[in-house]
Amino acid sequence: MTSPVLDGLAPRRRRLSPARFLAFAAGLAGLLATFLITTTNAEAAEVVVSQGKPATASSTETANGYQPGEAVDGNNGTRWASAWSASQWFQVDLGATTSVSRIAINWEAAYATAFTIQFSTNGSTYTNAYSTTTGTGGQQSIAATGSARYVRINLTTRALANYGYSFWEFQVFSGGTTTTPPTSPTTPTTPPTSSGGAKLLSYNKPARASSEQNDAQCNPCTADKAFDNDPASRWATNPTTGWVDPGWIYVDLGATAQVSQVVLQWDPAYGKAYQIQVSGDAANWTTIYSTTTGDGFKDVINATGSGRYVRMYGTARSSTYGYSLWEFSVYGTGGNPTTPPAKPADPTFPATRLVFADEFNGAAGSGVDTSKWTIDYGTGQNGEQEYYTNGQNAAMDGQGHLVMTARKETSNGRDYTSHRMNTGGKFTFQYGRVEARIKVPKGQGFWPAFWMMGADFLTGRPWPYNGEVDIMEVLGKDTFTSYSTLHAPMYNGGGGYGQSYKAAGGADLSADFHTWAAEWDSKGIKFFLDNTQVFYASKETVENTRGAWIYDHPFYIILNLAVGGDWPGAVDATTPFPSQMLVDYVRVYQ
């Protein structure tokens, strides 16, 4: 099972400008320097005792990757993965008998629903410290206590029956306590939405900060962007004057409010030590929450206080960079709140109300229905070799299929032609089930895709800030494997959040039609191949482990057949031309 980040192989459908990429990379470097899953539900005296220690396992997925040591290296970008069978184990040797207070596991999508944690002082006799048959994956903090030199997890039931087990980090803690405080960011609480009680108070309210960034690298990253309810815009301190401590940002709620919760969605430039403060006059501040063990991503802080102004006051940065927040949301009562635009209601799945369909039932040789699709002609991105023509490479076959053809022919300076189209400007939607029945081509360099882009891309928001959802990608050189991936500012390109998977029985996806689908609501996106769920991107998991969730707005649909590119590689002498991608239908239900 390959990684949800696709091990550096995921496509980059749109490229960042060099300036934006440098800014992103700089922030990411700071994040990676401190990228542990240091769950803050223990006292400061608690320490990780497993990092860098020898680790062994029953198996690995491949001979050269996903080794046991990659789950104890303190890097959430590497992981251990087992062979694809049910009975597996993983073990870390702490080097000496140690008093264990807690186990923290950051699971990959291939998690265990049933497993036991065992302790041993000699590596041969083990005692059970914890067991479950109802594991749910994600980030898991386990209060398993005792003395051990060897800590083992025995894995017995897989969440994904066709794969093995995998986790990014397996951490053993010693010292402190295991009492979880109400403000633990690793056990997020859903922000209140009840109109009769606490509500969002900070939306579109005036804001001030210690400094702001507003330049070519971050334009604009002003204080108000943290309160606009848009997780793809952010506030950042100024790179000239603001990469110092302290750094702060506050919001004026318009009137005195009773604050009950604050939610921070950090950029990689997060606060390791910070306070949440309230004030009646923006001059005299009272601290209602403080931490010295901030670990970035999403912090849900259940803290109470009274004031018109609410401030994040950072005293220690996570890196040499400054402070940056995608969102700073304040909940409570009182104030003078502005109600944000209402979002659509979540669909009930299975969704049955058909809101878009193209069955491709036209006469043989007829073109694409331009009342539904925009022909997206021109050159491709990502090192692709083709020129997408203005409809000449797509036609109905008279049997209910759209035929998208890749040809070896010269056009507009390229040696190959193909087809790309989208529903931008014709049909966009937010939430529902989108599906397509497709037969993909086989051959080195082919790269068929069924995907979606945030509709704000069409009005000027650059990739990846608009969001991208790749429902299906297959490489012609390996038509047994498909990929589904999300792309956003903090996870994109080769670092996208997704999953690879195979069809039932290991079928060759180019041999027949298969149906790819995504069921999307405000809680996440489930991906399906032939009505079998293959991946679930949970909003809460993404916000707590990868970055802001930027998919709660309208998207449009794209179909294309790329020829060559950075990911599939160039065509070669074995690549068959012409080759076709056949589409039986595209449907959207709500």
Image (cartoon, grey):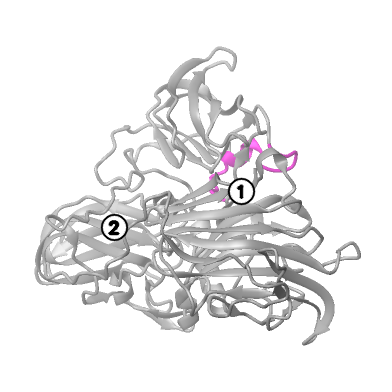
Residue 66 in the figure: left or right of residue 21? right
Question: SS class of the residue under badge 1?
Answer: loop
What residue appears at the point 36 percent right and 60 percent down from the top-left corner?
A: 265
Of 343 and 2, nearer the camera is: 343
Of 143 and 136, nearer the camera is: 136
Of the two numbered discs 2 and 1 in the rendering, the one whose residue sits closer to the viewer:
1
Name the chief secondary structure element in magenta: loop
Q: What is the x, y in percent for residue 515?
A: 61, 53
Residue range highlighted in magenta: 61-77
Answer whether residue 5 is visible to the viewer in this image: no
Of 345 and 468, nearer the camera is: 345
In the picture, which quadrant includes the N terminus? top right
Q: Is residue 349 above or below residue 267?
A: above
The quarter of the picture where residue 418 lies is bottom right
Q: CA distance from mark 2 to mark 1?
A: 29 Å
Q: Residue type at mark 2?
A: Val
What residue appears at the point 33 percent right and 38 percent down from the top-left corner?
A: 42
Q: Which residue position holds label 2?
A: 263
User: Alpha-carbon neighbours of circle 2 within 10 Å: few (<14), some, or many (≥20)?
Assistant: many
Identity of the residue furthest to the top in this view? 125
What residue appears at the point 51 percent right and 40 percent down from the top-left corner?
A: 107
Q: What is the x, y in percent for residue 52?
A: 58, 39
Of 465 and 583, nearer the camera is: 583
Q: What is the x, y in percent for residue 466?
A: 47, 72
Question: SS class of the residue under badge 2?
Answer: strand
Q: Is residue 314 above or below residue 510?
A: below
Q: Which residue position holds label 1?
A: 3
User: Alpha-carbon neighbours of circle 1 within 10 Å: few (<14), some, or many (≥20)?
Assistant: many
